[in-house]
Image (cartoon, helix red, strand yellow):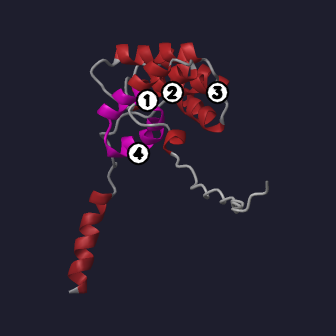
Amino acid sequence: MRTIGFVIGVALFPLGCGAPYTQLPPGAPAVYFDAQTALRMGNNERAIESFTLYLQEADNPSFRPRAYYQLAQAQYAAKRYEAALTTLDQLKAEFPDDKWPQVPALTGDIQYALEDRTAAILSWEQAWAIGTDPDRAVLRPRQRWSPRRPRRWMSLRMAPQQPAPRRRQKPSSTHRTT
């Protein structure tokens, strides 16, 4: 019985040694990985340069949406809010049929930083409508600014007050002196 198992194992071994995953798309170029590493390390200026270079040179559309989004994240972290909004607009223009909740969420964050509170809330609501439950868990902290929900300070209850101590009244004198 062991001999049969050994023979079958030896016969099938060459099948497992073939080239695995021959249908995978090509990987991202080094400039893309450099940009991601810079973003992760907090080097926003280098991330902006690398993502911009990647988007100018890349022919493969596989990583372009993510590169646009991460470029906008780096611009947002570098406080280049107008440039980040322009990058997100380019992403929406190049991929009009794709709907990602992260895009309107980041747009709302940028608008909030630009002190356009109404536009920020509308963008966050759009992200909420597009998103799934895991997305909403990330979006939930932004809800506290929604006009439909009272602000946290409005919903705090005051500590119960102690009743004021009663003052003793002076006994009324019935005795009059004339």
Residue 98 horizontal side relative to residue 158, left or right:
left
Tell me if mark 2 has few (under 14), some (14-19) or many (20+) residues whose alpha carbon lies within 10 angstroms of its own. many
125 drawn magenta:
yes
Q: Amino acid at mark 1?
A: Ala
Q: Considering only order in the chain, which callout, 3 or 1, is on the residue closer to the N terminus?
A: 3
Q: Find residue 155 and report its horizontal and vertical position in percent.
A: 48, 44
The residue to which callout 2 is attached is 109
Q: Amino acid at mark 4?
A: Ala
Callout 1 secondary element:
helix
> Which sits in the foreground, 122 or 171?
171
* C-alpha span from label 2 to label 1: 6 Å
Q: Considering only order in the chain, which callout, 4 or 2, is on the residue closer to the N terminus?
A: 2
The residue to which callout 1 is attached is 105
The tag on residue 44 is 3
The answer to whether any part of residue 75 appears in the image is yes
* C-alpha span from label 3 to label 2: 17 Å
> Which sits in the foreground, 103 or 60?
103
Marks 2,1: beta carbons within 8 A:
yes
Quarter containing the C terminus: bottom right
